[in-house]
Image (cartoon, grey):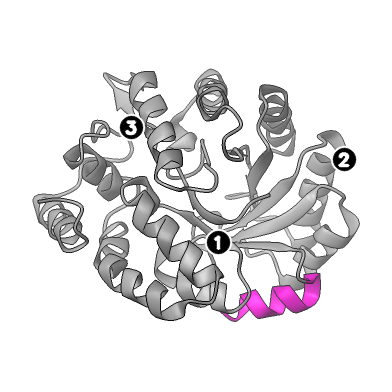
Amino acid sequence: MFGGSIPALITPFEGGNVDEKAFRKLVSWQIDQGSKGVVPCGTTGESPTMDHSEHQKVIEICVDEVASRVPVLAGTGSNSTSEAISLTRFAKDAGADGALIVTPYYNKPSQEGMFQHFKAISDNVDIPIIIYNIPGRSVVDMSVETMARCFQELENIIGVKDATGNLARVPLQRMACGEDFIQLSGEDQTALGFNAHGGHGCISVSANIAPKLIADFQHASLNGDYKKALEIQDKLTALHDVMFIEPSPGPVKYAASLLGLCSAEMRLPLTPISQETQDKVKAALKFAGLLE
């Protein structure tokens, strides 16, 4: 169900509010350019700064605009298990095809706590669930053993978005969970190696602004054409790098504004990127052939 290039969608804002027109345009453009799925309300979508009504609205708009053309993997995670259940239940009722659920952040649960968190969600909402393992933001790292336990014991767990940056985790998780366990990269820069180790695609930040290139890259790498994939990767490496030299989604939203997709507006505590970063974003876009 989930594989290939799946953009972690930015959420366009205008005057402090969700810009529905720009968001709908972005979603359809992503599909037209070859993306194989979309993720609303992830970290890149600034979900931590959206209240529940906005979170729900963005999921509803996304599902409506997608109109079953590609799978919708809605971000519904929380460090509160009851809140994660509520958001996941809403996503299912809204028509999402799956839920992307981050390991609980800040409160630092044990491996058993993480398992019980996902068990409670899986037991309460019948929807495919992708575990989002991102130790750099959540502080906790779900072990290979706990991940395998989740996959083997919890009916709705189907895979992981792996943002550990550790490519050794891919074959280890493949051996522990089997080939049917969907492994999606959470890092554009290492997506080629990730797929070579048995991955199934990438939930991508850069795909917001380079959807066709990244869709072509994913198609090539997943079909074993690593020469072609590397050619595309060489065009995109500078872009992938600059997307994270300041807190995301600052650079990608600025890039989107240069391409006329939406404004660069973000919500506090995120602030506009520096002039130096703006110059680097422009240079990377030009090198990739995305900006004249």
- The image position of residue 228, as x and y in percent, is 39, 74
Segment tinted magenta in the rendering? 167-178
Task: Please indicate, yes or no, whether residue 187 appears anywhere in the rendered image.
Answer: no
Q: Which residue is mark 1?
A: 201
Q: Earlier in the sequence, mark 1 or mark 3?
A: 1
| Mark 2 residue type | Asp
- Residue 176 magenta-highlighted: yes
Characterize the local packing of mark 2: few (<14), some (14-19) or many (20 or more) Cα atoms within 10 angstroms.
few
- The image shows residue 264 at horizontal and vertical percentages of 24, 36
Q: From mark 1 to mark 3, how far is it between C-alphas?
A: 29 Å
Circle 2 sits on which residue? 123
Q: Which quadrant of the view contains residue 260?
A: top left
Amino acid residing under circle 3: Arg
The x, y position of residue 213, in whole percent, is: 35, 58
Task: Name above or below for residue 149 compared with residue 39.
Answer: below
Q: Between marks 3 and 2, how big is the CA–CA gap?
A: 34 Å
How far across and how far down the image is residue 22, in percent? 33, 25
Q: Are marks 1 and 2 in contact (CB under 8 Å)?
A: no
Classed neighbour count for the residue bearing mark 3: other residues with Cα under 10 Å, few (<14), some (14–19), many (≥20): some
Q: Residue at x 30, y 34 (%)?
A: 266
Q: Report the magenta stretch's main SS.
A: helix
Which of these two is toward me, 67 or 44? 67
Q: Residue at x 81, y 47 (%)?
A: 156
Query: Crowding near pointer 1: few (<14 within 10 Å), some, many (20+)?
Result: many
Q: Secondary structure at mark 1?
A: strand
**Label 3 SS:** loop
Identified by mark 1, the residue type is Gly
Residue 267's disc is 3
- Say if residue 265 shows up in the picture: yes
Instruction: Specify which label sits upstream in the sequence, 3 or 2.
Output: 2
